[in-house]
Amino acid sequence: MSNIKTLVQQLVEKHGKTRNSLMPVLQGIVKEERYLSEEAMLTVAEELDLSAADVYGSASFYTFLDTTPRGKNIVRICKTISCHMQGKDELIHAVENTLNIKVGETTHDKKFTLLTANCLGWCHKGPVMLVNDDVYPAITVQKAVEIIETLAKHTK
Amino acid sequence: METKILKKVDLIFQESNVNEVIDIVTKTVTRSSDDIILDIIDSGLKGRGGAGFPTGLKWKFTKNEDSAVKYVICNADEGEPGTFKDREILDTVAPKVFGGMTICGYSIGAKEGYIYLRGEYNFLLPKLNKQLEEYNKLLKDNKIDFTIAIKSGSGAYICGEESALFESMEGKRGEPRNKPPYPTVAGYNSKPTVINNVETLVQITMICKMGPDKFKELGTKDSRGSKVFSVSGDTPQAGIHELELGMPLADFVEDFGDGDTKAVQVGGASGHCVPRKQFKDTIIGFEGIPTGGSMMIFNSSRSMYNVLHDYLEFFTEESCGQCTPCRVGCQQLLKGIESVKKGERKPAYLDELKKLANTMKISAKCGLGQSVANPFNSIVDNFKEEIIY
């Protein structure tokens, strides 16, 4: 049995075999795999007894449920007005240069994906960066680069 | 940090641990549910998420529905640009939110409560789950038949709209439903549901603790109580401030501005932009401009074109795409101001765009599309030159 199948079955077991479990199941897969592969979505459809289109429909609606391959660490930088006013452009450029990718891309070693996000809820402490679930408010360019470099060392 | 004119209030963030909240809850549930609901109606509390529906009435309607299953939902999908108070509330005084939910459950006859927490706030989960475990156990020990669980969002602004939130909780795309039926009749799982904002639920706990009269002493006739404001932008006092409702915007700017305030965006991206000349005559409250708490301050160094462009980009990306007025309207407004800026269109084209925004106001299915006209018209009307040149 493939890893995905085991993972999906565990998640369905935990959250229950109902339509209402679809979000937590998809979220659980993204937490482990960083994105939803075709295989993952088909398995979820089978396990929850839904049509594949139904699962894809929900999955593709949500920004945090990616359906394209992502790196092991997902870096999101808030681009909404308050962070804009507090230097999100400089922050994005610095991270782009450190990772040598543009927004929306994944590094060759598959360690990082860089994305922008709409308001992350830290308007009084911008700019803000979210790395996976960890939040870094009022971050300086220097500190952001340090965080990325440390993470690069520790990600296998 | 001090304010010179406005009085600061300390109710929401007044510390309250789990045991104190359980104490308030157990005392409250010795009263009849009708009495509690009457108190909430009497207090004049209106929803703190922005729409401002009277909380007590919402509860009464749901209580009156005949259904064995009902739900209480705490809307913690705080996505409005410029708003960050709910995160702070859940981070520092979450038990008071649980208390409000429990009192609501008892009052309307619901046994299950859910907190819909936006995915961007997942870092709060370990702490909240731990607090909930302790809280749920204490409810059980006190023989109160109610449990609270958390459901996570996955990065969609529209899920803050109540019916889209239910859809999301049911594992579907976060697309708003037609109304009626309203949530009080058919909400989560099509059962009668009370959905309240995080801050509203904290106010419930405080009203039950100190009585409605104490609450009514704050604010004005139409805007009772205090409100947590999320202050950001060009201000030396960025952060969270609890103030009385019904204040003149001029006083707010005097206390929070940097001395060079050009405009204040009240109520986030979907709110209204108030220019300097209107500060004196604008009241922040339900009799004037209501707000979910977002106050973004812009000084004269800021380009209002950039501000509007940012908002429109936000709405274009966050529109669920279900109804045509919003899906196409947001895109066209954005393209429209870009083409006026570039000189491809004459300045008079802005009037056409305003017509489009006003059409969205009456034809879009939900609050997202309907409210785009608020920032659009208020910025275009008051800062026309900045949009054109």
Image: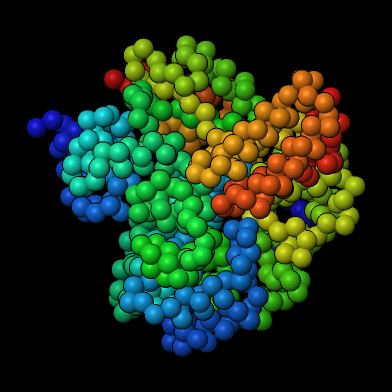
- Quadrant in the rendering for residue B283: bottom right
Residue B185 point in image, percent of width and height: 45, 71
Residue B2 point in image, percent of width and height: 76, 53
- Quadrant in the rendering for residue A142: top right
Q: Is residue B387 shown above or below B369?
A: above
In this rendering, would B190 be left or right of B299?
left
Name which residue lies at 20% across and 37% down: A43
Name which residue lies at 58% across and 82% down: B39
In the picture, the quarter occupied by the C terminus of chain B is top right
Q: Name the residue at the left extreme.
A: A1
Residue B6 point in image, percent of width and height: 79, 60
Q: A89 or B124: which is nearer to us?
A: A89
Using the rendered image of the protein, determine whether residue B269 is visible from the camera's viewpoint: yes
Q: Is residue A125 shown above or below B277?
A: above
Residue B36 point in image, percent of width and height: 52, 83
Name which residue lies at 71% across and 30% down: B336
Name which residue lies at 43% across and 82% down: B29
